[in-house]
Amino acid sequence: MNFCFKSSMPNVFFFIIIIIFPAFLNPGLNPAMAEGEKKYQTYELGEVIVTGERETKESPTTISEVSGAEIEKYNASNLGEALKLLPGVYLRQGRVKQESYATVRGFEQDKVLILLDGMPIYQPYEGLVNLTDIPAQNIAKIKVIKGVSSSLYGPNTMGGVINVITKKGGRDPEASLSCQVSDYNTRHIEATHGWKIGSLSYFMGASHKESDGFKLAENFTLPSDILAGMAQAPTPIPHTPIKTDSGLRDNSDYERDAITFTGTWDSTPNNTLGLSLEYYNNEYGIPAAAIYRETRSAGGTAHWYPRYWRFDDWERYTINVTEEYKVSKSIKLKGRFFYDDYQSVLNAYDDNTYTSQFRTAGAPSFDSKYDDYNTGFNLYGFWDGIENHHIRIGYSFKRDVHESEYTFYLSPSEYEKLISHTCSAALEDSMDISEKLTFTIGASYDTFEQKDRRQSFNSAKGDDINSFNPHAGISYDVSDSLNLYASAGKKIRFPTMKNLYANGVIGPQGNPDLKEEKTFSYEFGGQWRINHQVTFEGALFYNDIKNLILFDNQIGRFEQYENAKIYGAELSLLAKFTANLTGRLSYTFLVAENDDSTVIIETEHLKNDLIYKPDEIPYRPKHKIDMDLTKSFDFGVKLHLNGSWISDQTYYNHADSADNSKFVAEKNSLDGFFLLNTKITYDFNKHYQVFGAVENLLNEDYQELYLSPAPGISAWVGVKIAL
């Protein structure tokens, strides 16, 4: 490995100080850190569903959780890395800015509701949040609802819900500091502190992460015909074809800073107030990408272009205020107000020097400034006043605002502003038919209003949308060790601003005629605790989808499948072989197919529109196998081994090398791959730990997105101090 530091002596000195200093504080060997030992508590106010005096299951569907201990075991530094081993969840590279997104049971992340302590998090224009931007330092647990979720979560939950619950301070004060380093000047430093003093509790964290970029498994060069096409694409300033990457992936560097705070105040025994604050400041590159676009001034032809983009500034800050009040033994009320703001500067450059911005045609250079925010509130009521009934009612409102300004060389700036409102009213009842049988029924009425559209080329707003979305489910405890459940329901996802109104000049081209997406979802599953050592979990799922919206990165267009189906199965086996050896094996089978829909991509300058009937939904691997094994030794060493095998996945190539006057739809596939990761820790005592980790241990060369290579092997060494 090539561990190359910007200035080796300060780094080595810093590392030695961290290693030696705790030895003077705690001489001798004390008991090692107990597995799962923690001083922090979980921020319960971050949950959406609360219960009365009798504990009830949130929803009769598949719910997976990732604990804080598991996040540390995986050496996960962000939310995306913490999710990668869950069955049914596939962490993949994004289509436009090559960010990190999760696909849940075949539904892309823009169809999955991502919550942070119950607050929706997404950049309003795109409807997405880069999972790499959410640090793991303050995460207590992650709840993933994969099937039909409660009506209280509202719309945009076709693929389920991911709720990230943060930490809060415990009775004993705690503090931690960790530092880990890897090659290409990669350094991750995290610090946390939490405590509960009387009725006040708080937990805060800070992190700094920086790197020159990631290492490739092998040299990467674009196909010769694409490089030739870039060189020949018509433009006043010749394009610079994307160069071969050797070792370091060009423009994959990053610098990320984060500060987080969670606090609660028990003002009375029946009333709790909560406050969450977060601030992120990032700068990072986007590896150069090959895109295929119509050339508006070239007489009806399409060409390959290189795209050189960077986020020269990216900031986000959030405020989340929550109150929970116990009115009586049977009534609880909960309210939440939130504000989530995104400000960024995305720049496009002429070439791989990332310095000049003079190109006005082809793939134009530009400065773009985004100022997006979403704000709103949730109101919930929970009533257990009727025997054997648990009634839940909710109302949610959020306002999405997108403002942007694009500046092109020798052209006036282009300004746009888009505003939309989303509302949801929900009612749900969970009925205890018997001690073993529970039946849940509920519905939500969801509305989407396009309040304002100001764009230089168009100001016409699309139609408002409303939808009634019912669901029902049943849960039956066959025995103390076996639970079966089934659910069915309708879920909706409203188009994003980008889906509807993207102008197509610097990226995707929107389609104001896109319809809302709907799915009718069905699931049957169960959990069987075979004995004290072994647990089996499984589920079958089927989704009948209408108006599925997909984005094709190669040509920058949104597509809509009138009818589609996603179905499959998940199987998991969890075992505790001995007191010191545990493991998990899971398998996901997924079929994502077009149901006889014709996809039409209208072109403005080519001789024909693209009309085709794909048989598969692209970038959905049919098979995924995950494994996780942990071995603890009596002398303070723990060995963690995990891995995932991902099968081949389909994509469609729209470039015809023999005729660039039209788009085509040529079906191809990306090869499957196996990623193996390991981590070993050694606890000197209960306060001090050193560790090493290797990601992609076999140095697998693979792609998750056509023409975009993924990281190769990376090795980490680090230390953690916990007081």
Image (spheres, rainbow, N blue to C red):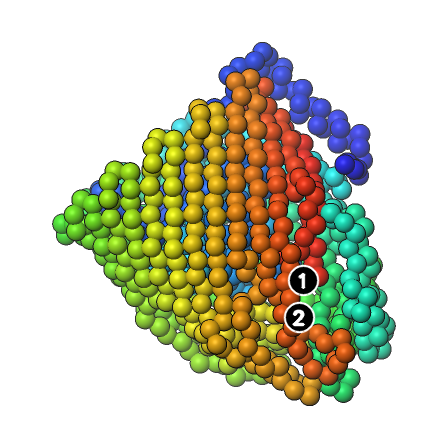
Furthest residue in direction top, as rendered: 28
Q: Nearer the viewer, residue 262 or 511?
A: 511
Specify the label residue 706 is tagged with.
1
Q: Residue at x 43, y 30 (%)?
A: 576
**What amino acid type should be assigned to the residue bearing mark 1?**
Tyr
Q: Marks 1 and 2, Cα distance to the nearest angstrom?
A: 9 Å
In percent of the image, x 59 and y 12: which residue is there?
27
Q: Which mark is residue 653?
A: 2
Instruction: Report x, y in % for residue 401.
Output: 52, 67
**Quick check: 504 left or right of 561?**
right
Q: Residue at x 74, y 60 (%)?
A: 288
Q: Is residue 521 above or below residue 513?
A: above
Q: Earlier in the sequence, mark 1 or mark 2?
A: 2
| Residue 340 visible in image | no
Could you tell me residue 685's position as x and y percent? 55, 18
Neighbourhood count class around disc 2 (C-alpha, 10 Å): few under 14, some 14–19, many 20 upward: some
Circle 1 residues within 10 Å: few <14, some 14–19, many ≥20: some
Name which quarter of the figure residue 244 lies in: bottom right
Using residue 606 as the reference point, say whether residue 395 is left or right of it.
left
Residue in the picture at 78% in, 84% down: 298
Residue type, mark 2 in image? Asn
Q: Secondary structure at mark 1?
A: loop
Q: Secondary structure at mark 2?
A: strand
Q: Are marks 1 and 2 in contact (CB under 8 Å)?
A: yes
Q: Is residue 181 left or right of residue 460?
A: right
Q: Which image quarter holds the N terminus?
A: top right
Q: Is residue 223 in view from this perspective?
A: yes
State the image coordinates of residue 350 (x, y, percent, origin top left): 80, 66
Asked if residue 630 is positioned above or below residue 545 in the image, the reply reads above
